[in-house]
Amino acid sequence: MESAAHVALISSPGMGHLFPALEFATRLSTRHRLTVTVFIVPSRSSSAENKVIAAAQAAGLFTVVELPPADMSDVTESSVVGRLAITMRRHVPILRSAVSAMTSPPSVLIADIFSIESFAVADEFDMKKYAFVASNAWFLAVMVYAQVWDREIVGQYVDQKEPLQIPGCESVRPCDVIDPLLDRTEQQYFEILKLGMGIASSDGVLVNTWDELQDRTLASLNDRNLLGKISPPVYSIGPIVRQPGSKKGGSSELFNWLSKQPSESVIYVSFGSGGTLSFEQMTEVAHGLEMSRQRFVWVVRAPKVRSDGAFFTTGDESEEQSLAKFLPEGFLERTSEVGFVVSMWADQTAVLGSPAVGGFFSHSGWNSALESITNGVPMVVWPLYAEQRMNATMLTEEIGVGVRSKELPTNALIEREEIAAMVRKIMVEEDDEGKAIRAKAKELQRSAAKALGEGGSSHHNFARVVKLFGC
């Protein structure tokens, strides 16, 4: 009998990359009995990330190897994507050394999108190589097709008069183009092109979605007459979402409060591990929540100049300051009976899984979107950076599980009246739109569960992939 494969995953820094990688590893080790090693490049300044890594190590379901830091002292690149790409490039020789030292080296390497250059190590050690895309299939389509845009489109994408076409997929509005492609003169633009071409060199791509959610895009990616011309085989294996922590995110007070609220009466407000608002926008959000007259849980982070400024420092306890200084005077007192404000971080999956939660005010990061969908929770989407504008468009216009502001939050101050109206729309409005959004969220919750269940599309694809690993 052929022995089970030894699968290695490599994850780049950031909670949005770490959580899906660890959950993916958990599924491989527990459901398919594979030997799994996860190589992690941690964010040294993130206390929350360090706690997550420590918890994974303590669970003992798979081996966790923290790679030592690479020298970044000479790097002047300031963009998150640029720094991530350089960080992971400089970890390739470190990964090579770690694999060389293993008594039983892996037979398969799975790399997240920022770790694609580690395929060089897979080639050296004769390992099968797969790309893991923790985002959705539309984002993957952009990644692999950007090389064609680069050859065929003149000028900045954001200045184009017409949507950018992708064969067999929804086109991308210029204003929705992902951040790294906004300026074709910046280093991060060329890094994304390189990563997209690297994906094409893999034996296959594992994407965190499911067939019924994105059937058209997935069909194009696997059609040799469409995107399949430049993409390797794509396998939808999602939704892969983090499971709630056993300690309820360290806040029994929060969950005690939630347990006392009526069913689906609370909107959860969080802008993700790297999402921060300006002081002025925080003020409008606070007043909007108050005007909506809805119960809420709000994870508050200190305002910053850059929306992605906290990417590498999620949960840095040195940032925890008095919440009152960031919120309108008297807000905490006026909302004390209907609101619960949390500093920095909460166990999001546990909050969204609470029977009391009936809405999610979110930055529309894909991990958060999946956590919302799998709990049947509709969204107010508030895109800030990365591919979140595309996600917001898909969630509101294509899938129909949320609402969004008329203007992009990164381009204009969204005022309290509009915020209150959006919150009420998904929570209590009985018009056709509000009811349809809430119904769609429940429908997709069932669809996701079916995809993962016995005989479901993702269950089937997961089994196919494991067989390809050589098991």
Image (cartoon, rainbow, N blue to C red):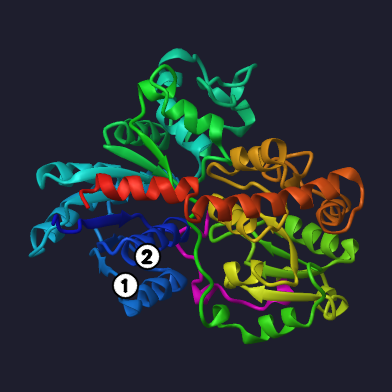
Pointer 2: what residue? 26
Residue in the foreground of this view, choosing between 357 and 411: 357
* Residue kind at label 1, given as amino acid type: Leu
The answer to whether the residue labelled 1 contacts the one labelled 2, judged by CB atoms less than 8 Å apart, is: yes
**What's the distance in space between the residues labelled 1 and 2, CA to CA?**
7 Å
Q: Is residue 314 above or below residue 170?
A: below
The residue depicted at 62 percent of the width and 21 percent of the height is 163
452 within the magenta span:
no
* Residue kind at label 2, given as amino acid type: Thr
Pointer 1: what residue? 61
How far across and how far down the image is residue 269, in percent?
Answer: 70, 63
Instruction: Determine whether the residue tagged by mark 1 lies in a helix, strand or loop.
Output: loop
311 within the magenta span:
yes
Q: Is residue 333 above or below residue 449?
A: below
Q: Quadrant of the N terminus?
A: bottom left
Disc on the earlier residue, 1 or 2: 2
Region rendered in magenta: 308-325
Instruction: Determine whether the residue tagged by mark 2 lies in a helix, strand or loop.
Output: helix
Q: Is residue 180 above or below residue 462?
A: above
